[in-house]
Amino acid sequence: MKTTPFTDLHIALGAKMHEFAGYNMPIEYAGIIEEHQTVCQSVGVFDVSHMGEIWVKGPKALELLQKVTSNDVASLPVGKAQYSYFPNEQGGIVDDIIVYHYEDEKYLLVVNASNVQKDFDWCVKHNTMGAELENASDHMGQLAVQGPKAAEVMQRLTPVDLSSIPYYGFVTGEFAGCPNVIISNTGYTGAGGFELYFYPNEGRKIWDALFEAGKPEGIQPIGLGARDTLRLEMGFCLYGNDIDDTTSPIEAGLGWITKFVDGKDFVNRAALEKQKKEGVSRKLCAFELLEKGVPRNGYEIVCPQGEVIGRVTSGTMSPMMKIGVGLGYVEAAHAKVGEDVCIRVRNRDLKARIVKPPFRK
């Protein structure tokens, strides 16, 4: 298995380790519920160095990105990031990504760990215009410092005014004595905080500085288990569960990052435009259980009369709300907020209701 700059540290700290996207990654330390609550109430640090980073550079960079991504990169100023995805020719999603406009004619794509090579190959395949592409995934470390006290802790380690970085904005500056660290006001938890990108050899220095600075706030390392429950409480999609090569972005509620602007002839635009105009047969919905139980991936969603109308793609017991919550595709006729449905759990139909995320209020 591949390692990150922090793998030995996770093992030394007693983390429960497991393979994820080819990497030996920490799933939990003190326990998923405790770690989840730490992020919601204070500050936690995730090692997300397994994520992929692809540079797109040169005078043709924008042209390539306008072709392969769904969002309008032409509207993205330097110093800002945008959520987007790569549409495929079959109406599905190659991957969901974040695009950073790093400087003029230079963009950074942050992609899911399990899709790094697939995404890079996808960009190469469509690079008929000659943009410069570089897969920098093995040369970049990443930590996500998340929670309501994250900015307070991090401000002790950088001259950069963190309060001046807007949501989905970023700066490159000194952090913990290391130059050229990308400090990004993004995250996957809904609890606030920043993500840091740096050279792998500086990872341990940054980690140690964070944990020293965060002692008064009770800073804790957080595993991928809590990362999943945190994103699910917010209703955020996970690639491979809620979206994939076969799911339509319009079905998945990603129409808001699908920009049909003049001059942007992206992959499969015509079919997606038609789908948005005419509607879809199913929609990705958030639901919460009204009875005790835990929904899981693959469970059937049924109407009150017992007819199968969909399937759960992600589910868990919400650590903050103490109820079963999840996402799943539901036939469009039943996909309305407030609609009563049931989740079939071990041959029992548990009452549930379709709601508007986030679950965590």
Image (tube, rainbow, N blue to C red):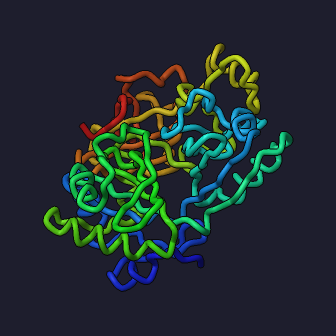
Residue 357 against residue 174 in the figure, above or below: above
Q: Is residue 294 something one can see in this rendering?
A: no
Residue 313 against residue 334 in the figure, above or below: below
Q: Nearer the viewer, residue 149 or 156?
A: 156
Residue in the image at 86% along x and 41% along y: 128
Which quadrant holds the C terminus? top left
Q: Position of residue 269 (x, y in %)?
A: 73, 25
Extreme-left residue of the structure: 216
Q: Position of residue 318 (x, y in %)?
A: 29, 49
Q: Nearer the viewer, residue 41 or 71?
A: 71
Extreme-right residue of the structure: 128
Query: How many dots with numbers?
Result: 0
The answer to whether 155 appears left or right of 10 in the picture is left
The answer to whether 107 appears left or right of 7 in the picture is right
Q: Position of residue 1 (x, y in %)?
A: 59, 78
Extreme-top residue of the structure: 277
Residue in the image at 28% along x and 62% along y: 157
Residue 331 against residue 32 in the figure, above or below: above
Q: Nearer the viewer, residue 55 or 14?
A: 55
Residue 98, image quadrant: top right
Q: Position of residue 237 (x, y in %)?
A: 49, 43
Residue in the image at 60% along x and 56% along y: 53
Residue in the image at 58% along x and 37% along y: 84
Q: Is residue 93 something one can see in this rendering?
A: yes
Residue 10, image quadrant: bottom left
